[in-house]
């Protein structure tokens, strides 16, 4: 394949023979070709190769490029780049690129974005740069952006689009359709028509397909759905996502504190929120406060640092617990060899319970109403598994060290620690949630510290009692 | 508040004064009231209280009820329950309830569900029970269910709805709208009209809002979008979700191997997939192969068991590594006290890198094209943090034990283990992905085993060289 051959993305419809492993989007070969072309400065080739690409794929391409080639690439594509590319970019990569742009350049592409996407880009800028950019934007658009920025981060106000179709209840379907035909500045995508009262408060909705199927003379009030979930503008995006998932919403009206319709959130905006929130929990549980894949070395090291520091202190607390038993360890060195086993099993059993609990709290499946029942179950599960592993490790230790007393000590410590693990693995996240602390952020440090210390103390303490 | 007062769910539109902390859905007080009413057998009260509830909220209520009250509740609600409640239920709870029902009862509610939801319920049944239920279903509906079951689990075929609107390209918009008005059996929700060729292969799409805004005489071929992402019926749901997220799709056509349009997937189906897939990764990383919150004790213990068993063997491997140095430990008991610190810090640093990598692989941000660059970054980050913590633990150890040689040993072991952690934390998931093994399932056992063993061996080995 010569490098001048046009680069095409895989298209499953193009070839009936293709198998289902065909993936849309980028592949390594494509990235390599573009990278070579950038190095060789073949601007026309790149421009024509990317002419048909979706903005999300171009954003992925930029993320895959070596950082020093990214600016060159932007230079080559200048004026030919869909502004959506900027909103599709990873935040770290975008910040890096935007840093090198003049406020007027930033303003130029921000002005082409949807308000919600534009606000996303703006909020990542330094306060001063944000002001510089806003000054470059025409006054009428600036007001909308400033309004967007005025809503709290991760709130419904930031997610919503302001363009929507709202009609009074006394209109007919025919009137509504004529209104749609005559209105030039309509939202790109919408799934329902809102019906509002004279104070512009939402009173009903009509799915587009129902509107299409109705006769022109039908009144909107006669075919509208009265039940609808309204979203307060300051609702947290996690709660908004919950509503969409729970009630399978396609779109929902956003209202201000007086109940007036001020925007609409559609399910495609929610897809990203669900993905983000799940990612947040996953990373938090591992002690990574934000996604740093494309962050630079210093910021990545800084993001990971606090968790490691906390862990250093908890590990030292475990060491301090061990040091209480140094005479015992000196007497029977086999204990030093075996002691990490009980702590490690407790840590793993605790993390299993903890993770199930954190996820169940996030999905509202674990609540005060069923908490005791589930805690009870976890303790029985822990007793079952703990007993099994106690017998197993007891037998293995006996075979290894030939001392039945050590076996009894490690087996007993194992049961104790696995049951403690199951209990704290459930209690810690539930308690944090009650205290309005995100259980994902702090649970695992509490749980593993507890299981480490209990693991060492139970094992070495029992050994001191029984063996010394 | 007396218990006969009607139970209402929170409704923010009902009261302008309400604050934004109002949550839709259940709360503990409501669950408690219903639970009391079930115990007291107040059937009429419960039926009227729940009359306006959404099926998803009733499903949540059933999950929150004590298991022995669930059947009583179903008895009370018999004939008044929206069949969607069954598809909204947690799988474990549903299995438990369905176990007590006769095939004819199961068939009755399955027959009321959308095909995709019905197939979801059916696939969880035992093979024999599934056949019994299918026999109770009228032949014409049974064929659709059997077709649904014939697609692989978690494939596009299972997600898609078969009801869709497809029109030939030579039709006009007016003709299309008349067709919609005359067709009784239309899908509940749809966002676009598909245009097909004479062999029923999709050639374009028209968003509903565009169809509504067009004049009746316009030909569909003149306003259709030609570009569309087609989904092969056997595509894995994770890949389908990726397409929807990447290209912000509202709906997409599903095609069979001959390229014929056989179904449609809409973004609201994808919301659940994204949530499920993220949950799967989160739980897998913690060694929980499936969500077991509502599982019974035995199945939960069984689900958690394999991970703990693997962990027992890896912990014993670490013990075996320690036992190579028992003479050293015997000579300097402080080493036994300190040795968990290096292993623990390595484990945490490794888990941080690993989690970022697993997530980035799932979102296709980490690929062969940028893997070496990011591995390189991770190693520098690990060197930075490792060096910092080496100095810190060196100083603390010196203050604690007053022996500069022990400080040097632990500091050196710390740098080594944290750098190893960063490296294996990135290499293990990337390698597993290349081998087509889900990196979430097996990465963490490899990484923590490595960091445990390297942690103990580096620390005790260096101590043996330097101190003995």
Image: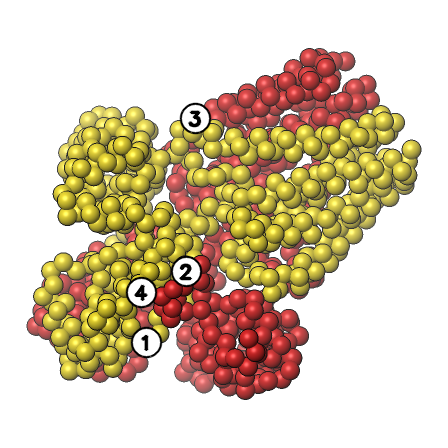
Chain colours: A red, B yellow
Q: Is disc 1 on the same chain as disc 2?
A: no
Residue B130 falls in image quadrant = top left
Q: Chain of mark 4?
A: B
The residue that mark 1 highlights is B226
Residue sitting at 30 percent across and 35 percent down?
B127
Identify the residue position indicated by label 4 in the image. Answer: B259
The alpha-carbon separation of the residues under discs 3 and 4 comes to: 46 Å
Residue beneath label 2, please? A19
Q: CA distance from mark 2 to mark 4?
A: 12 Å
Discs 3 and 4 share one subunit: yes
Position of residue B107 in the picture relative to residue B330 (left or right): left
Which tag is nearer the camera, tag 3 or tag 2? 2
- Closest to the observer, A142 or A376: A376
In the image, A307: left or right of A261?
A: right
Of circles 2 and 1, the one toward us is 2
Q: Is residue A97 above or below residue A42?
A: above
Q: Nearer the viewer, residue A459 or B43?
A: A459
| Mark 2 and mark 4 on one chain | no
Q: Does label 3 or label 4 sit earlier along the sequence? A: 4
């Amino acid at each position: 394949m010569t490098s001048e051959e046009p680069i095409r993305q895989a298209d499953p419809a193009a070839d009936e023979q293709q198998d289902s492993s065909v993936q849309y989007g980028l592949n390594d070969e494509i990235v390599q070709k573009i990278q070579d072309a950038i190095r060789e400065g073949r601007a026309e080739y790149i421009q024509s190769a990317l002419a048909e690409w979706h903005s999300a794929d171009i954003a992925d391409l930029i993320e895959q490029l070596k950082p020093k080639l990214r600016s060159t690439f932007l230079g080559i594509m200048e004026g030919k780049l869909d502004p959506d590319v900027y909103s599709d970019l990873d935040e770290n990569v975008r910040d890096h690129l935007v840093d090198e742009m003049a406020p007027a350049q930033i303003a130029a592409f921000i002005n082409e974005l949807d308000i919600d996407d534009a606000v996303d880009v703006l909020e990542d800028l330094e306060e001063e740069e944000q002001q510089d950019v806003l000054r470059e934007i025409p006054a009428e658009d600036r007001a909308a952006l400033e309004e967007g920025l005025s809503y709290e981060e991760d709130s419904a106000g930031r997610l919503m689009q302001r363009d929507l179709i709202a009609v009074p209840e006394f209109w007919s379907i025919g009137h509504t359709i004529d209104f749609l035909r005559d209105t030039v500045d309509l939202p790109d995508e919408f799934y329902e028509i809102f019906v509002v009262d004279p104070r512009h408060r939402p009173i009903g909705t009509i799915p587009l397909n129902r509107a299409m199927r109705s006769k022109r003379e039908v009144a909107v009030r006669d075919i509208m759905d009265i039940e609808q979930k309204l979203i307060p503008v300051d609702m947290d995006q996690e709660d908004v996502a919950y509503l969409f998932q729970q009630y399978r919403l396609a779109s929902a009206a956003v209202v201000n504190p007086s109940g007036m319709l001020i925007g609409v959130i559609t399910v495609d905006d929610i897809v990203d929120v669900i993905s983000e929130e799940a990612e947040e929990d996953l990373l938090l549980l591992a002690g990574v406060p934000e996604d740093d894949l494309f962050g630079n070395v210093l910021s990545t090291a800084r993001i990971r640092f606090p968790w490691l520091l906390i862990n250093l202190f908890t590990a030292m607390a475990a060491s301090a617990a061990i040091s209480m038993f140094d005479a015992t360890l000196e007497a029977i060195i086999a204990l030093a060899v075996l002691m990490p086993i009980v702590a490690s099993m407790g840590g793993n059993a605790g993390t299993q319970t903890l993770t199930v609990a954190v996820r169940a709290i996030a999905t509202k499946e674990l609540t005060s109403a069923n908490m005791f029942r589930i805690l009870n179950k976890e303790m029985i599960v822990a007793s079952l598994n703990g007993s099994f592993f106690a017998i197993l490790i007891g037998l293995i230790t006996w075979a290894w060290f030939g001392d039945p007393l050590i076996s009894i000590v490690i087996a007993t410590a194992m049961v104790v620690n696995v049951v403690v693990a199951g209990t704290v693995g459930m209690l810690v996240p539930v308690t944090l949630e009650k205290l309005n602390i995100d259980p994902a952020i702090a649970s695992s440090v509490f749980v593993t510290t507890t299981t480490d210390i209990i693991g060492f103390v139970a094992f070495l303490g029992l050994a001191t009692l029984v063996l010394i």
